[in-house]
Amino acid sequence: MVGIGYRKDFAETFLAGTALNPDFIEVAPENWMGIGGYWKKQFAKVLERYPLFVHGLSLSVGSPDELDFDFLRKVKAFLKETGAVLYSEHLSYAKCDNAHLYDLLPIPFTGDAVKHVSERIRTVQDLLEQKIAIEIVSYYTPVAPELSEIQFIRSVLEEADCELLLDVNNVFVNGFNHRYDAAAFIEQLPAERVRYIHMAGHEKVSDTLIIDTHGEAIIDPVYELFAHTLRQLNRDVPVLLERDYNIPELGELQAEMDRLTSIKKLIRKEKEYAFN
Amino acid sequence: MLLTDTTRQHQSALASYCRTGNLAVIPGIHPENIREYRRLVYNVVEDILRNAYPLAADFLPREEWEALVNEFFSRHSCQSPQVWYMPKEFYKYLAGNDHPVFEKYPILPDLLLFEWTETELFMMEDKAADYSISGDLLFSKLVLNPEHLVLAFDFPVHLKNARQISGTDKGKYYVAAHRDAEGEVIFTDCSAALARILGYLAEKPQTILELFHRFEQEYRLPLNEEQQQHIIRFLQNAYQHQLISGFKN
């Protein structure tokens, strides 16, 4: 399955035409919960056609603040109402000192943060009565690190007993920004926990920094890293194309999705060949 | 709490830097790249506010707009996990603090409220109304569209370009705003008396005759033929544009 991040920017064209044919769509619940009118009607139409994956922005599992249980209950209701296939969130924090920041800040890679975040993810899973997938975020600076990034992520996944949303572009971005081998990093991740994959474009702003913009097409090295990722997995995993800014003609997004599909098929054939 | 005070302080320092631009000592950070977080967070907030308040953002000099955005985000703790709702907090922050910018630009409170009302009505959850489409406008009980708001402005921000409004425009202006079946938000200029009539209808469905009686009793003022016809024409127009949804079953 290859899906697309459903955005209001292209909702009308998407529903009216045939240029884009995803297997599923993904939305941020924050943008669609508790709304009515025009967008609710449009959302109802798209839900009739496509399975829904839900990818949260504001739960802030890495926050030092208390979890927002009222918000979490609303998310739970939204997941139920929409029949969502999966709920994922970010391994980051977006709220601190009782203030939302509306962006994803990096959690310090420390042992106490591992325990804190893991406990919160377990609480979320208990309340939602389902496992959630946690996304490795792109980051531009470490914050008071005591552990390596891979140690931190592996520990959280293990202690929280949650699933992994593997954003291949984020690993590429992080590998570039923090000078490590992205392919080797992916090999060290627990493949059995990978539930979902994100793919996106980015912007290289200097010789030493890439920003994860979701505003460009996926570049070849990220496609290659995607293929490498699939070779680590022994099963089919849904893949999402994210495009949040600088939205091109929908045909261009479909071409990117087609390329992702063909890479998936290619890797599947490789595995079948190796197995036979 | 499993998080140590030290880790908590580091997280707080990064968040505070993103909000204020004031960077405390945080071990291990990349001094150049940390700036990206401040830039990205500010851009998100400014972009959301500019999209919610395009008229106000255009009306204010750029430096003053940016200063307001900065001040709001650094001093106010945003509470909504839904970013589309955050602009309401911006309006409430300025209005609640009786901000000096309102003294300098007296039309700004109305302009912000006007713009926020459009977003709020456009996005608000659907409200069910019990009504029938068959009835007689003159004799049936009228059901007001529950997806509406009645606003009172000191300046005609709904009628004129903000830059063309001057002190001589100051007065009392009433506007009914509602969402139609297509989801479009419609603003209807009205008088104080018509706003009051809508207030009666918001309480419960009533016939036009009942509305006349209610008004006359409240204001101890008999409505003459011309005034009654004016109200009827307003209600007919309101019905055509779905400010009145229909008739009580």
Image (spheres, rainbow, N blue to C red):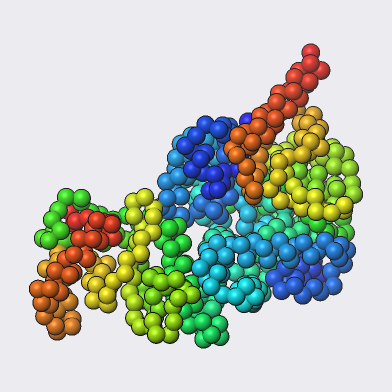
Q: Is residue A85 visible?
A: no
Q: Residue B75's spot in the image, x, y percent?
A: 64, 77
Q: In percent of the image, x 81 and y 44: which residue is there?
A: A172
Q: Residue furthest front?
A: B164
- Relative horizontal placement of residue A86, taking residue A142 as reference (left or right): left
Q: Is residue B54 visible?
A: yes
Where is the N terminus of chain A found, in terms of image quarters?
top right
Q: Residue A209's spot in the image, x, y percent?
A: 83, 54
Where is the C terminus of chain A found, in terms of image quarters?
top right
Q: Residue B24's spot in the image, x, y percent?
A: 81, 74
Q: Quadrant of residue A133?
A: top right
Q: Residue B38's spot in the image, x, y percent?
A: 74, 66
Q: Residue furthest top?
A: A276
- Relative horizontal placement of residue B249, taking residue A42 as reference (left or right): left
Q: Quadrant of residue A44?
A: top left
Q: In percent of the image, x 17 and y 53: which residue is there?
A: B249
Report the label total.
0
Which of the two residues, B25 or A242, is positioned nearer the viewer here?
A242
- Relative horizontal placement of residue B48, taking residue A263 as reference (left or right): left
Q: In percent of the image, x 84 and y 69: which residue is there?
A: B26
Q: In percent of the image, x 56 and y 55: which residue is there?
A: A30
As drawn, B152 above or below A91: below
- Relative horizontal placement of residue B87, taking residue A97 as reference (left or right): left
Which of the two residues, A190 or B126, is positioned nearer the viewer here?
B126
